[in-house]
Structures are given as C-alpha cells and as structure tokens.
Image (cartoon, helix red, strand yellow):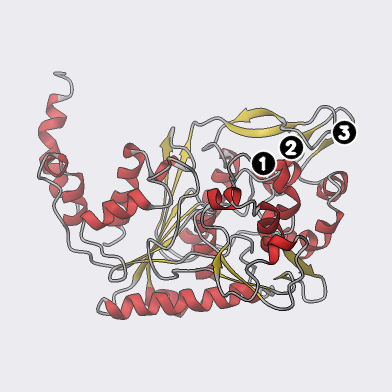
Amino acid sequence: MAIHTPLLRLLPLLLMLLPSPLRNYLSPARHEPGGHGQLEARHPIIIFPGFSCSNLEARLTDDYTPSLPRCGALKGKGWFPLSTNPWDLVDHDYIPCFEEQMSLVYDPVLNDYRNRPGVETRVPNFGSAYGFSIKIDGATEYCFIKLNKELEALGYRDGDTLFGAPYDIRHAPPLPGQPSEVYSDYFARVKDLVQHASEKNGNKSVILVGHSFGGMVAQEFVNSTTQQWRNSFIKHMVLISPTPPTGLTEVVTNLASGPTVIILPNIPAIALRPMWRTFASSILSMPSPLVFGDKPLIITKHRNYTAYDYSEFLTALGFSNGLMPFMKRVLPKMMRVDAPMVPTTYLNGISVQTPEQEVYMDCNFDVTPEHVYGDGDGSINLVSVLAFANELRRQHLERNIYFNFIKIEHATHSGIIVWDNSLKIVIAEILRANW
C-alpha cells in the first residue's frame, strides 16, 4: 500500500486538471452515498442502439396473402407490434407469421429491398432514448437502459437533451450513391432530429453515441451528409464496439446456421435462417479479404472457405439468391473505410474469447459449428477492430481531426455498456466529448 500512497495523494490535483463534468463524474465523492450529483448537460446526445434493441410495427393491407389463416388475423386492423415482445409471438403461436411478415424481397432491377406485398412496417418511438426494448429475459440493463440512467443522473433528460434514433434492423446502411428507400427516409429523419436537438439546446452541436450495429448506422449517417453540415451540427461521435466494415466471423456463422442476434424463446436459430437470409443486414459486414486474407473462416472435410470464396460459400449454403445483392451492395462496402471526419472516440473490448473460425466437419450447416477462438470482444474479431481503428485514425490525422481509440480489457460486446468498470469509462468519454 505504501507504494500507492503518493499517487493517491496526487489524485485530487490530477482531478482538478480535468473539465468539470468529467472531474465530478470521476470524483470518489460522487460514488459515496448522497454523492450522485447532477451536472449541467452541455451538448445534446442522440443514441443509436445495438442490433436487437429497435422495435418494428406492421400493418397488413388487402394485398397481403397469408400462408396460414391465423397470419391474416390482424389484416385491416391497423398497426401492431411485430418484433417488440418475443414471448407474445410464442404464446400466440405467431412465429410462422412473424417470419413471413418480417421477410424482405430483393429487387435486382432497383438493387434495393422491400417488404412482402401487403406488409407495411415502421419503427415506433423514433426520437426517444427509451424507444428501444430488451428482448432477452432478465437482461434489464441492456439496450442503453443502464447508460441512459447514468446520463440522467448527470442531468440529461429524454426528449430535452437526450434522444434516440432506432432503425429497421432488416435493412443495411448503403454506401453513398447506393439505393435504399428505407435508409434515405431514415437518414432524413435523423438529420431533422439532429437539427431539432441542436435548436432546442441553444444551437449547440450534437454528440452521437452508437453501439454495435448502431455505431455503424451512426457513422454511415454522418458520411451521408456534407462536411459543412457536419462541422455545424456534430460535436463528437462516440462509437462503442461498432460493427466494422472490415467484418467479423460471426456474420458467416449466422448465414450458415441462423441468427444469434434474434432470440425467440424455445425457437432454435436454424428455424429463423430462411427469414434471416432475406435481410439486407444479414450479408453486411462479412469478413473483408483485405483484413482476413487467406485464413480459412469456414472449415469442412471437403474444403475450406476464406474471405475470397464467398461465391462458392453462398452456393454451398444453398443461398445463391444472395450472390447478386452481395456483389452489388456488400462487396464494394467491405473494400473501403470512410472515416466520419468529425471528432471521434472509438471504444472496444479486447481479451475476450471470440470465434475466429467455424468447423462444420461433416459439411452439415444445419448444426451448431465447433468454434476456433481468437481475440476480440466476443463478437468482433480483434484483427478487424484494429484494422478499422487504424484506418479511421489515419484518415482523421491527415485532416488533423481528433480521434481516440480506447481498448478495454475483458469488456464483452454487449457488456461494455452494462458492466460497471467499462460503463464508467464510456460515460467519462461521453462527458469528455462535451469539451
């Protein structure tokens, strides 16, 4: 203890060098009983949630032809929650209807995705930081719930200084110039929200905070705007374990064996695979050959598949329908990284067992594979995180724009905004972004 005593004595002096919101948040007194004081909320914040947090509502029109009679029971009865409560879907035997009404159709002429005929969808509660829902039983602090409470304790208020931008999880943010009716509308709404939040707070610029897929969405939104607009309205971006364009092994596993990011009670992932493969988001963020190279991602007794073998891999999966959208929409995206060119902080967990290769020794993609692990945050491979972060840093430094990359030991992909040690770092960086 004697070794640490001088450092402890210096702590009050070191804290005095920090901006006041950050100093007060990190102060030991704040974490004592009665020390949970509020701070002035300086810049408004907009939250972009992780993949499984946004909700979807549906409305069935006369053009909808249900495959089962019960799937048409809500036809003509207005909007109803489609992906808000997984337990309701199971209790009402609505899973086949859920899969049918969630599925998308790819239009090769328009190079875009749309709903099935007669199905209309919308994302509810846009603008609210609480416009998301947790879909895993007992996980009461996920989907920014705990982080939002921390921000509220510091003086932020939903609808006043704190906002949310939920999105349709089925669609994928496009590269500039690529068609996407859904994201054209979404980006326009986000732009209006940013300008509204700024105006409501004395024309202060806005901090964007995105987690996981929401981090990618936030970044692609910024990239869809002009540099002049960004300079006027975006104070800072805080990317928390963002889904990188450089890809992750988990994406090919989900394509092969069904999604791990959509969890329904007592329903195996393989049962959701046909629906999952219709989503534009299902083929996004496949491991980039520029990062993963010739290393096998999928191992079978007959042949291995690398990031250079996606045409053969998709064919082996029986998913040849995915070849055209992959070539036209995904391949160009995985070959480039476009930095947001606004002050950016990137936080990601490391030193967590993360699937790096998947073994289907009997070539049976209907079973759960054996994992070969490497480093990462449990979902995103470290090699991809580092490649993405290094390229963002390079582009920002060329323009002398602030960029900071923070690695958090043992922080998992979802736990980074829930567990106290990592959450404290995240909150501190959000407060630092105010200055």
Mark 2 and mark 1: Cα distance apart in space: 7 Å
The vertical placement of 233 against 402, above or below, is below
Q: Are marks 2 and 1 in contact (CB under 8 Å)?
A: yes
Mark 1 and mark 3: Cα distance apart in space: 17 Å
Q: Are marks 1 and 3 in contact (CB under 8 Å)?
A: no
Q: Point out residue 414 in the picture as x, y percentages from the top left corner.
A: 47, 43
Mark 2 and mark 3: Cα distance apart in space: 11 Å
Residue 171 tag number: none
Q: Point out residue 189 in the picture as x, y percentages from the top left corner.
A: 49, 77
Nearest to N terminus: mark 2 or mark 1: 1
In this orientation, which residue lies closer to the viewer: 302 or 370? 370
Q: Point out residue 186 in the picture as x, y percentages from the top left corner.
A: 54, 73
Q: Amino acid at mark 2?
A: Leu
What SS does tag 3 mark? loop
Q: Are marks 2 and 3 in contact (CB under 8 Å)?
A: no
What SS does tag 1 mark? helix
In this orientation, which residue lies closer to the viewer: 283 or 57? 57
Q: Which residue is mark 2?
A: 297
Indicate left or right for 389 with 343 as reference: right
Q: Residue at x 18, y 63 (%)?
A: 40
Nearest to N terminus: mark 1 or mark 3: 1
Mark 2: give few (<14), some (14-19) or many (20+) Cα within 10 Å. Answer: many
The vertical placement of 68 against 61, above or below, is above
Residue 249 tag number: 1
Q: Amino acid at mark 3?
A: Arg
Q: Which residue is mark 3?
A: 303
In this orientation, which residue lies closer to the viewer: 418 or 17? 418
Q: Quadrant of residue 67?
A: bottom right
